[in-house]
Amino acid sequence: MSHMIEARQLTKRYVNERTGREVLALDHVDFTIAAGEFLCLVGPSGCGKSTFLQMVAGLEQVTEGTLTINGKPIAGPGADRGMVFQSYALFPWRNVIENIRFGLEIKGLSKAEMNEIAHAAAHQVGLHGFEHAYPKELSGGMKQRVGIARALANDPPVLLMDEPFAALDAQTREMLQEELLSLWQGANRTVLFVTHSVQEAVYLGSRIAIMTARPGRIKTVIDVGLQHPRDITAAAFGELMKPVYAALKEEVLKAAVSARALA
Amino acid sequence: MMAGSDDIRLRPRRGGALRPAAGSPQSRRRRRGAADLRARMQALAIRLALPLLLIALWAVAARSPGVAPVLPGPAAVLATLWQMTISGELFVHVAASLQRAFAGFVVAGIIGVAAGLAMSQSRLVNDILAGPVELLRPISSIAWIPLAILWFGIGFNSVVFVIVASCIFIILLNTLAAAQNVDRDLVNAALTLGATPRQIFTKVTVPSAMPGIMLGLRIAMTGAWGGVLIAEMIATREGLGYMIVRAQASYRPDIVIGGMIVIGFVGYALNWLFLALQRRITHV
Amino acid sequence: MSDRPNTARVLALGALGVLLLIVVPWTLAVLSGVRPIILPSGWQLLDAADFLMRTDVLLHSTWVSLVRVNLGFLLAVVTAVPLGIVLGRSPLLFAAFEPVVESFRFVIPFAWIPLAILWFGTSEFGKLFIIWYAGFFVLLLPTIEAVQGIDKDLIAAARTLGATRWTIFWRVAFPAIVPDLLLAMRVAFAVCWIAILAAELVASRAGLGYMITDARELLQTEVVIIGMVVIGCIGAIYNALFIRLQRLVQY
Ligand SMILES: Nc1ncnc2c1ncn2[C@@H]1O[C@H](COP(=O)(O)OP(=O)(O)OP(=O)(O)O)[C@@H](O)[C@H]1O
Ligand SMILES: [Mg+2]
């Protein structure tokens, strides 16, 4: 069962603890993410994409407005919202299987159950044969597979991904995109995916939300009407990328101008 | 010549007293072809040259009339060591020193790690303990010896007290720093996997602080070994420290130098053991 | 969680901690009739401090220890740093010296005290030797590592700009290792300070180490505690001085 996420007049202000200065990261955001959709979030750097994701995860507090999941306000982090980090965030003292098992240990499953699920998840993301390797022995792509498997092992209805493939080389990224899509299609799961790559957004998303320069708002939402598997060389694909590019470019320029004005 | 020096640079460095182990297991296990044999022999010769030269100098100096009474030669020292080994005397002293060092180290380890972890978890505990810690920390361990004797008399308790004083703060501060510097993303990852604050502590904070804690313990172990020696010189009737001061008083330089060699050897062995243990516990 | 430590709160809680963990137990012990040999009261401490100041025992002991530790430390710096720079630059010499350095490193300075007495008696030379030895190895290894860690590109860049070897050393290499050197010097001084006290405890007729061990034999616990306070203060002052220096060169 997948979940719907709703932001109403959602505002986030950070207070810098040393200088006492306030930063308005998100400004009255109204937005709904439908259950089961693959939503890609793009926007200029510093516009509040990570902030939004962290608030959905429950890692950051809401300043004003409401943020609900299936109608219930988000009070804190929980196992129903899995997260995949750009920095992988693997536990270096645990091997692959032990990393994947982390959430299951928290749930208090029996050892047999844990191992079964963890091995299945490892298999699913192509980590077969690496179960007992430690993170430092893995390549970036392998590490992110572990990160994804760890989140999936918990079977969360919502999956939050903050630029998960940004640090990977192009080939690995394409492979993982492919695998992520098949994982999403198999299970009815809501995915919120932050990226800087327009092509990645158009390739993966069922919808693309473009954010404004800071303070972040949702500028436009674009429906990607293409069926999976998508062909990035097809003309229709290129046509879809154009409006996303245009909107993003406008905001990136705005961000640059306001940065210059501040300096 | 160049091949030789390059080869030397490839050798993994052993961990210094203030640093974690260097060199991954892979580089340690690096296999070399037979073609490298010459270069390896050359490197070995370079490494052995200076120690052999020093030992030769020592032997020569020990024969010169002016120095001989206070500097027995290598052979005489080894003979004395051998003598003391078969008589069992050396073993008694080494065992006594090790026992005390170990007792003090364990006590300091338990208190230091526990206090460090508690300080990392609670701002209040941190601020309250910071006062006494900052006040007592600068007092060097040596300065506690006279007070320890006044409090506990000559013997085991005094020595253990001094050892605790000499290593507890290193352990505490290393633990605190390690437990405070846990990667924020790791904590966040655990939170999104459903961990409670308590589980964060046991499953994230403690394991991630482990290398730092181990480093503190290893530095402290060197401190404990030094502490036991100096305390034994003053506050006991057995142990390696006592053995060498008594030998000095009874004018036995062979025992003094032999004792120093044993002290160095045991210190080296302890360090090696600790590193081996550390590699087994932490995989980082 | 806050980055800005609330100074007033920290000081107040720190004082509270000192009160709860040191002052209160001490007072209770004194009130419950512990003998002054175990724990003297605050008044007895003040009396003893007053006496020590009037007879200049304390000042003289402090002076003697300070002179020794500074001399020995300087000796260690002027020997260890140049040698460290040479060994850091030459892999061959480093390979030759490493086994010796590694072996001596484990023979802790305290172990040399009896031999130093045998060789030099209780003369100043023996004490200087112990301090030098203690500081030497603590300085040598970080110096070597600092030199080995100098960015090769930096040197190459300076060379392409036409700098001579001498300029490269003084204008590029040396500044690059100064922060590491200062850190090593801070640690080394602390080690020297411990070493001189140890040497004075075992083999001396003067200095702070001698003062507290002599007071112990005379069962003057007040003097022992005052000595400990002075020892702690000197250690803390030098530590703070080195930290200041380190901040100066942080670029
Ligand atoms: N913990 C924090 N304290 C203060 N300000 C913060 C904090 N986290 C983020 N900010 C500020 O909030 C704004 C939004 O940051 P956020 O990380 O959400 O941007 P982003 O869209 O994810 O950027 P990027 O694309 O570079 O990752 C930025 O201006 C940032 O400086
Ligand atoms: Mg971000």
Image (tube, coloured by chain):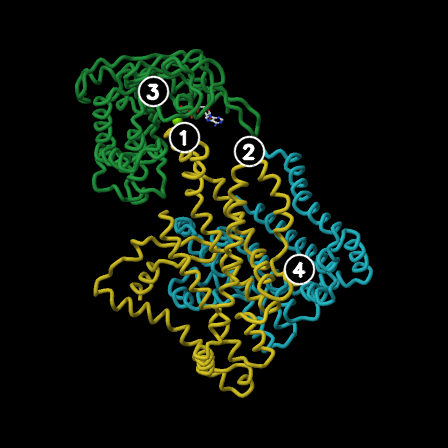
Chain colours: A green, B yellow, C cyan
Give SS at disc 1: helix
- Between the C-alphas of marks 1 and 4, the distance is 49 Å
Disc 4 crowd, CA 10 A, few/some/many (<14, 14-19, 20+): some
The residue drawn where x is 67% and y is 40% is: C16
Disc 2 crowd, CA 10 A, few/some/many (<14, 14-19, 20+): few
- The residue singled out by tag 4 in the image is B151
For residue A140, the mark is none
Q: Could you tell me which chain the residue with mark 3 belongs to?
A: A
- Between the C-alphas of marks 1 and 2, the distance is 22 Å
For residue C3, the mark is 2
- Residue B274 in the image: state x and y as whole percent: 42, 57
Residue closest to the far front = C32
Give SS at disc 3: strand
Q: Same chain, marks 2 and 4?
A: no
Observer able to see residue B30: yes
Q: Same chain, marks 1 and 3?
A: no
- Give the foreground label among 1 and 3: 1
- The residue singled out by tag 3 in the image is A41
- The residue singled out by tag 1 in the image is B191
Amino acid on which disc 2 is placed: Asp
The residue drawn where x is 71% and y is 51% is: C29
Give SS at disc 2: loop
- Give the foreground label among 2 and 4: 4
Q: Nearer the viewer, residue B226 or B198?
A: B198
- Give the foreground label among 1 and 2: 1
- Between the C-alphas of marks 2 and 3, the distance is 31 Å
